[in-house]
Image (cartoon, grey):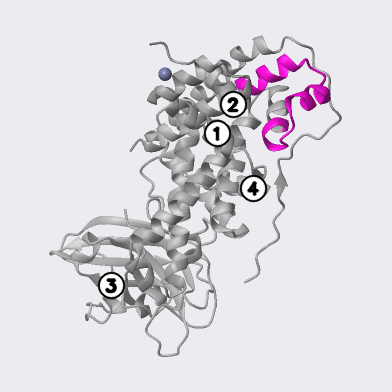
Amino acid sequence: MNVPPVEQTPVLLDRRAPRRYVDGVVTGVRDFEEEQDDVVRSLAARLVEGDESALEAVYDRWSALIHTYALRALGDAHDAEEVTQQVFVAAWRSRHTLTPSPSALPAWLVGIARHKVADVRAARARDAGRLAAAVALPEVRHAEEQSKDDEVAERLVVRQAVEELPDPRRTIVLLAFWEELSHAEIAEKVGLPLGTVKSHVRRGLIKLHQQLEGVRHDSRRP
Amino acid sequence: MTHVDLDDLADLVLDPDATPDSVREHVESCPECTDRLAALFDVRRLTSGEPLVAPPARVREQVLAQVNDVPGDAPVRPVPLQVAAPPPEVARPRRRVPVWAAGLAAGVALVAGLGLGRTTLDDATTPGRDAPEAVVAAADLTALDSTAGRGVARAVESDDTITLRVQASELGGEDGFHEVWLINVDGERMVALGVLADGDAGEFQVPRGLLDEGYLVVDISVEPDDGDPTHSGVSLARGELV
Ligand SMILES: [Zn+2]
């Protein structure tokens, strides 16, 4: 079967020339985070009410997360697209089950994606005539894949959280954690004092931690 | 005792050498702070890997098309396969080894050949018989690769028997005959009901127990005339009885 070419649009790290940021941005960030939480909360509420524009906004914000998750878990572009589509259609149809909280929304979408990925795997196992094997070792197989998937999902949730940080924090955190630059190198690059950079990295790490904990917590809910 | 605040724990992750001994000593003796520190290290461990990859634009269009397909989101209209959507692997037409066939080969329960009663075509084309009947479930049939309508199937009840009335449409002119199946929502079991012998309509008696067991997905396949009783793997229409 020919898999149609995929027009992938990677969300790339911003590699534009280093910008110089005015100092003092750190103070405004707290408000920004709270504002973001409110945005997500009201998005979830609108979705539950059946507002289609909310679905569009939810799709625009989290489809890359879900698609990348499906792509990593299934290793097949066609299946990943199919799962992405199913997740958002299913999200719309079962939106009444969503509890509007900032981390519940992505946790809920990832939860739906987990199920869809499991469906595809089950179909593949049967398709390959490996039904007997799949039945014989369900726990081992399942547990291994599950923990791998969870790791993938968490990595992507963290990545999503970084993308949602306001700049320059986003750029600074990407440089520190993904490019592994030292704080001094980052300070040089973005033209901010070392102390400011450190503060951004620290607050960034804490924000990622909170986001991840939220998603973990909400994933555990029935 | 006061715990170490999150900022200091973060510094312990980011710059351990600069952390005062007092902080370090507290964390070492405090399970709670140790846990929080471990969680922060965990985040640091997870900060790697490639960026997110957006899906192609067509996926967005497909999602919105499917959602818009239900005007006003009226819950009265049955949405095919809402709960038990077949995995994409199943849904793709023209696979040589269909999922179910593989399942059948592996000994998964097949309820074919039970001698399911099948009424004649004449009955199918003359609705409205003596006994009063009630539609107990219905399925909007659609194509598998789109939401294009492919007719409707109704399960009607009269005198304690269930009859599935299938009125399909636009099944295409592909060679072979059209066979009606009921697939269990578990995606692993299916039963052949019979052939749409003339045109796109047919009527099949179904043991009530089958529906109760979850055989709710009506499927119409195109079957080559090869004597193979299993599903060809090419489905033209499908919908879930609700
Ligand atoms: Zn403590």
Residue drawn at (53%, 25%) of the image: A40
Magenta segment: A175-203
Residue drawn at (29%, 76%) of the image: B110
Marks 2 and 3, Cα distance to the nearest angstrom?
Answer: 63 Å
Q: Secondary structure at mark 4?
A: loop
Percent x, y of residue B152:
39, 60
* Front: mark 2 or 4: 2
Instruction: Using the image as rendered, state which of residue A11 and residue B171 is in the foreground.
Output: A11
Q: Secondary structure at mark 3?
A: strand
- Look at label 4 and name its amino acid: Pro
Marks 3 and 1, Cα distance to the nearest angstrom?
Answer: 58 Å
Alpha-carbon neighbours of circle 4 within 10 Å: few (<14), some, or many (≥20)? many
Res. B145 image quadrant: bottom right
Left or right position of B163 against B186:
left
**Type of secondary structure dominating the magenta stretch:** helix
- Look at label 1 and name its amino acid: Val
* Front: mark 3 or 4: 4
Percent x, y of residue B123:
27, 74
Q: Secondary structure at mark 2?
A: helix
- Marks 2, 4 in one chain: no
Q: Is residue A195 magenta?
A: yes
For marks 3 and 1, the one nearer the N-term is: 1
Q: Which mark is drawn over residue B43?
A: 1
Q: Secondary structure at mark 1?
A: helix
Chain of the residue under label 2? A
| View extreme (bottom): residue | B227
Residue on which the image places disc 3: B204
Q: Which mark is drawn over residue B74?
A: none
| View extreme (right): residue | A17
Up/down of B152 relative to A15, above or below: below
Instruction: Using the image as rendered, state which of residue A94 and residue A11 is in the foreground.
Output: A11
Marks 4 and 1, Cα distance to the nearest angstrom?
Answer: 26 Å
